[in-house]
Every structure is written in structure tokens, then in C-alpha cells.
């Protein structure tokens, strides 16, 4: 019985055995393998040349292969080997050519990318230098109305394009999260039968001055719904703690009444707008104004915070909407519909943050694309100035109210009105708000009404305010409903 090398399957000239796998190898082959890999080829266990054990055997005479016993057979074998070598060589040349082409393409791409990066870096540097030399008011003119000879609009537009990448990334995240939430209704959400049992549980009338009565707007802190923000006819902004039943801060600075307020979702910062043509950014902890945004030349009628928490949308009677950076107070863009030439009455961001809606004094609802700064859709149908708009959290529905005593629901996918809620004659709609899940819609005005979405049936009706209801907000999972009105009172409804 002859020994056979486990690697070559041939009789070895210098056989040796591996103590790791107990296999026989040709010493020449196993030493090369160990030098390259350092392990036994059979079981991949560590193996060194010193561990190999030589086997002493008499050298056998290897039998010749049957195919190599004659000259024609040998020539045939050589010819087969030559053909195989040539075929392998041809394959290698093809692979080499493909690799060269791929490498050349990659080099061209790398060169082009470097050129683009260098050009963009140069443009960004130039834009920043140009922006640094601009006067503070240079960015307050819309790109549409600015003469081509003035560079400010181009600089601001360029910066807005840079911010659009951030807006697009945020919109992608928000859309994904919204679709996940939309598949199921939160278990903690108050059911309609429980919501119908809500009653007034608290009322506070001392937040604003009694000499100039009226709360004109309100908002809840998204991260702590115990904190309530109100704006009054007395020109003050008030932060109220619902749980402690005390005022946290009274913010003074506007020269006219406060018509819009927003609480920042993650910072101790609030925003307010007024007919004095200014938007103010306030520090709640410091109790002072930290930024004044002068984006308009007439009354600011609407305010909405982008989901990034870094930018504000505002509308005004000067017919413009503006998009501003809250950190710097810089107005990034300011746009109007020159064909319409009518005052804007309200504004609200879509939950994804890439589009928004504005209401006008001539009954129109306009949908705008923020990145393109263009009017992409119009919803006619109301017969009076639009007073309030609200997007549902599902991103598909838009609710609008106007001075025609009606609330209209619009499908943003089909761009049409699919439901109109006719209210009492002379009913004044002042506030619309969906809860976070998009299950309920609250309407404030002559009274408070809550509707369950999809069926659009009324589940609640409160007439506790002695004046118009100007602000509404749902607590987490609709655990409570808060309202503010012209009777200077802040009310809370719950079980």
C-alpha cells in the first residue's frame, strides 16, 4: 500500500505526517502551504514546519499514466495543456482590460467630483462673503420683485438651496415616521365615547390685562403640555403652568396686540407675531426678547414653525409670506403671488415641512412648494376671508375655516373638497386644530365643537366662553382640550 499526499493526491517523494490532522503530505508542498498560511490545510489548525514528522519509506517507482505510454499520447497531453493555458491567458487578458476600463472610469469620476467640490466650495465662500457685506435689510425683498442688478436675492436664494437639503432630509424622516404612526391608532388615545363626556375642569381669567380684554391666540408646549402659551390684546405674551396654576413668564415688547404664538418643541423659546409688523423670539427662562425678525411691512397674520425647529413661516397683510432663520433673524426668502395681489390671513406648514398652505382675504387657500417657492395648488370654495387652516397629522387632509360660517375639508392627494361642515348662521370660525393622531378636529369660534374624523360627526359642543373662542389645543392623546377666548379666560376640558 503506497502513501498519497493529501494535497496533490500523488505518491510523495518525501512524505511527512501532520500531528494536527494525521494526514500525509509531500514535504515540499506542505512547507509552502505553512509558509503562506501557517495552518494545517485539512482542518485549519495552527501548524509549523517543526511539527511535521518525516516518514521513512522505500521510494516506489511511480507507474506511468496510461495516456503517457506513447509519444502520440504525450504530444496529445502537451497539446491539451497548451490549449488550456491559452484559454486561461485569453480570459486573464479580458479581465485585465475590463479592470483597466473600470479604473479609468473611476479616475474620471474622482476628478469630476473634485472639480465640483472645488467649485461649490468657492461659490459658498463667495456667497458668505457677499452675505457678510450686505446691509441687514437686504434680504427683505422677494426674489420676484428684486431687480437683477441687486445681488442680495441671488445670495439668499443660494443659501435657501443649501438649507433645502436639510429640509428634504427632515421631510424624509417625518414621512416615514408618520406612515408608521398612521397604521395604528395609539392605545392611549381617548376614545370618542369618553371624549363626549368631557366637562370643564378649570378656568383662568387673570392671565392678561382686564383693561384691554381678550386672548387672541394660544399654543401648548409639545414636550410638556402643562405649559400653555397665550397672546393677548394687551400686547403681552404669557406662559402659564397648567399643573401649578401660575404664570411662569409675562413677555412684553410688542407695540400692538399679539395675534399668533408658537411654543418651540425642544427649547425654552417661544415665538409671537403682531400687527406691529414684527415677529419676536423670546426666552422663557430669561423672560426677555432674544431676536426680532422684521420680515414684513404690514400686520403679521400667521405664524408656523418648521419641523426642524430652526425656521419660521409667516404671512402678512403686505401680501407676502416669508421664511426666516430664527437663530440669526435673517429672512431667507419672501414671496408673493403678484397675479393675486391680496392680503394673506393665515399660514401653516404641512407635517412633512416641504409644502405649506396660506389663506387669503379673497377666500382662496393656496398651497406652496417651499423649495421652489411656487404656488402649486389653489382651493377655491369659501365665500369669505379665510380665518384658519390646519393640516391633519396623516398628511392627507387640510381643514379650512372662513367667514362664511363653514369648515371645509380638502384631500391633498386629489386636490378637491370632499366634505363641508355647515355651521350656524353668523358662526365665526377663529381656530382649527387636529389632535396629534389626526383622529379629532376641534373648531373654535362662536363656541367649541369637536368632530371625529372620517365620519365627521360632532362629539362635543361647549358654550362656556362668553366671547369668541380664538385658540384651541389638544393635550397628549387628547387627554384634555384647552381653549382661550376674547372673554380673557383660559379653559381646560377633561373627564
Image (spheres, rainbow, N blue to C red):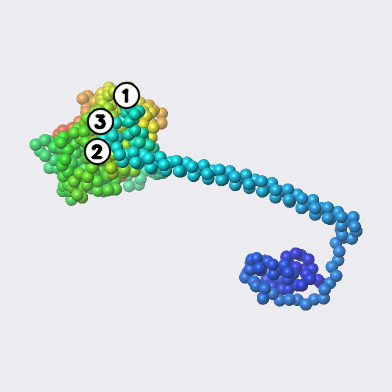
Q: Which residue is drawn at 78% across and 69% down?
A: 12
Q: Quadrant of residue 453?
A: top left
User: Where 489 falls versus 52 (above or below)?
Assistant: above
Q: Residue at x 45, y 43 (%)?
A: 118
Which residue occupies the foreground of this view, 221 or 47? 47
Q: Residue at x 59, y 45 (%)?
A: 104
Q: Residue at x 28, y 44 (%)?
A: 327
User: Where 104 falls versus 48 (above or below)?
Assistant: above
Residue 293's tag is 2
Residue where numbered disc 3 is placed: 316
Residue 338's tag is 1
Which mark is nearer the camera, 2 or 3? 2
Q: Do the residues labelled 2 and 1 touch (CB within 8 Å)?
A: no
Local packing at callout 1 (Cα closer than 10 Å; few below 14, some 14-19, many 20+) is few
Separation (CA) of disc 2 from disc 3: 13 Å
Q: Position of residue 477 (x, y in %)?
A: 30, 44
Report the side of 469 relative to 176 (left or right): left
Local packing at callout 3 (Cα closer than 10 Å; few below 14, some 14-19, many 20+) is many
Which residue is most to the bottom? 56
Amino acid at each position: 500500500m503506497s502513501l498519497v499526499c493529501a494535497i496533490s493526491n500523488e505518491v510523495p517523494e518525501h512524505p511527512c505526517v501532520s500531528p494536527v490532522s494525521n494526514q500525509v503530505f509531500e514535504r515540499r508542498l506542505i512547507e509552502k502551504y505553512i509558509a503562506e498560511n501557517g495552518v494545517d490545510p485539512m482542518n485549519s489548525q495552527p501548524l509549523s514546519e517543526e511539527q511535521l514528522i518525516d516518514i521513512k519509506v522505500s521510494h516506489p517507482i511511480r507507474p506511468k499514466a496510461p495516456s503517457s505510454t506513447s509519444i502520440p499520447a504525450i504530444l496529445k497531453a502537451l497539446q491539451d495543456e497548451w490549449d488550456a493555458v491559452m484559454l486561461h491567458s485569453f480570459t486573464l487578458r479580458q479581465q485585465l482590460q475590463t479592470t483597466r476600463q473600470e479604473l479609468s472610469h473611476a479616475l474620471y469620476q474622482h476628478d469630476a467630483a473634485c472639480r465640483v467640490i472645488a467649485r461649490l466650495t468657492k461659490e459658498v465662500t463667495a456667497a458668505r462673503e457677499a452675505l457678510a457685506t450686505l446691509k441687514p435689510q437686504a434680504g427683505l425683498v422677494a426674489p420676484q420683485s428684486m431687480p437683477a442688478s441687486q445681488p442680495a436675492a441671488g445670495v439668499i436664494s443660494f443659501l435657501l438651496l443649501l438649507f433645502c437639503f436639510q429640509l428634504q432630509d427632515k421631510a424624509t424622516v417625518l414621512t416615514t415616521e408618520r406612515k408608521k404612526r398612521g397604521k395604528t391608532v395609539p392605545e392611549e388615545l381617548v376614545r370618542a365615547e369618553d371624549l363626549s363626556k368631557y366637562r370643564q375642569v378649570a378656568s383662568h381669567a387673570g392671565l392678561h390685562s382686564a383693561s384691554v380684554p381678550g386672548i387672541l391666540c394660544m399654543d401648548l408646549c409639545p414636550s410638556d403640555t402643562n405649559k400653555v402659551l397665550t397672546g393677548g390684546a394687551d400686547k403681552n405674551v404669557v406662559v402659564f403652568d397648567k399643573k401649578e396654576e401660575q404664570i411662569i413668564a409675562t413677555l412684553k415688547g410688542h407695540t400692538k396686540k399679539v395675534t399668533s404664538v408658537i411654543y418651540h418643541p425642544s427649547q425654552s423659546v417661544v415665538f409671537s407675531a403682531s400687527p406691529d409688523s414684527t415677529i419676536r423670539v423670546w426666552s422663557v427662562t430669561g423672560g426677555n426678547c432674544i431676536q426680532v425678525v422684521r420680515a414684513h411691512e404690514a400686520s403679521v397674520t400667521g405664524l408656523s414653525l418648521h419641523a426642524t425647529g430652526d425656521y419660521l413661516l409667516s404671512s402678512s397683510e403686505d401680501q407676502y409670506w416669508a421664511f426666516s432663520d430664527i437663530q440669526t433673524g435673517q429672512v431667507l426668502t419672501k414671496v408673493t403671488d403678484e397675479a393675486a395681489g391680496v392680503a394673506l390671513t393665515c399660514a401653516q406648514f404641512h407635517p412633512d415641512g416641504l409644502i405649506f398652505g396660506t389663506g387669503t382675504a379673497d377666500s382662496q387657500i393656496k398651497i406652496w412648494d417651499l423649495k421652489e417657492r411656487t404656488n402649486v395648488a389653489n382651493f377655491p370654495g369659501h365665500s369669505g376671508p379665510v380665518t384658519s387652516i390646519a393640516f391633519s397629522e396623516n398628511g392627507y387632509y387640510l381643514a379650512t375655516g372662513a367667514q362664511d360660517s363653514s369648515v371645509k375639508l380638502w384631500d391633498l392627494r386629489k386636490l378637491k373638497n370632499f366634505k363641508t361642515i355647515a355651521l350656524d348662521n353668523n358662526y365665526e370660525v377663529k381656530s382649527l386644530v387636529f389632535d396629534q393622531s389626526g383622529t379629532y378636529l376641534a373648531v373654535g369660534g362662536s363656541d367649541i365643537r369637536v368632530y371625529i374624523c372620517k365620519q365627521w360627526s360632532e362629539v362635543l359642543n361647549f358654550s362656556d366662553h362668553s366671547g369668541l373662542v380664538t385658540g384651541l389645543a389638544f393635550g397628549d392623546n387628547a387627554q384634555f382640550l384647552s381653549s382661550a377666548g376674547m372673554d380673557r379666560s383660559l379653559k381646560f376640558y377633561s373627564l
